[in-house]
Image (tube, rainbow, N blue to C red):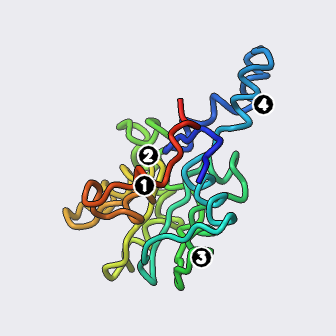
Amino acid sequence: MRIGFRLRPRSHCSLGWLPKTSALAGYAARPIRVGDRVHTFTGALTDLAHDGWTPPPLPDNVVPQTHCHEYATFKGHRPADLLRRLGVHRVDEAEGCCGPAGNFGFETQHYDTSVAVADLALTPRLHRLDGRPVIADGFSCATQIDHLTGDQDTHALHLAELLDPNPGAQSTAHLLDRSQLP
């Protein structure tokens, strides 16, 4: 398998490499060529699934929280869509913003607003988890989930953690053609 793009595990980390961002900053063609090859983790897996990749067994029922950057910038590569494509039968997506808007929602003067936004979609899903895993690839989303649950047993997982719950137990290095990576 050859992977001919650069992978950024957090969607907000990818924004600076996108062609339109590079153009706004006045960069020349080289960053734009790089930007065309940058994908989020979800986007990369979507491409791999399209090419026939199948994941290890997944839970039948999950609650994903899509990061706002993925809604706004990486349309068509939402974790919920990918999870359905990979065979998860019930995907109970918390559609909408989780609340923090980066650091803004964790500042004392904005925290109540952050929680009120989360109460529109995310919090109701968290109250109905019943042991289902919560997927949140965005750092702000994962942190907000930890704040809202206050439960030591409920933590948001990155999609990579759902796919490989025992990292290090088995090497996956053989899946990558390292000649394509920097």
The residue mark sitting in front, 3 or 1, is 3
> Which residue is the extreme one toward the left?
152
The residue mark sitting in front, 3 or 2, is 3
First in residue order: circle 2 vs circle 1: 1
First in residue order: circle 3 vs circle 4: 4
Question: Does 137 appear above or below 51?
Answer: above
First in residue order: circle 2 vs circle 4: 4
For badge 2, the amino acid type reads Ser
* Gap in angstroms between the C-alphas marked 3 and 2: 24 Å
As helix, strand or loop, the secondary structure at mark 1 comes to helix
Q: Are marks 3 and 2 in contact (CB under 8 Å)?
A: no
* Gap in angstroms between the C-alphas marked 2 and 1: 12 Å
The residue positioned 43% from the left and 53% from the top of the image is: 174
The quarter of the picture where residue 51 lies is bottom right
Q: Position of residue 108 (x, y in %)?
A: 35, 37
Q: Which one is in front, 105 or 126?
A: 126
- To which residue does mark 2 refer? 140
> Image quadrant for the N terminus?
bottom right
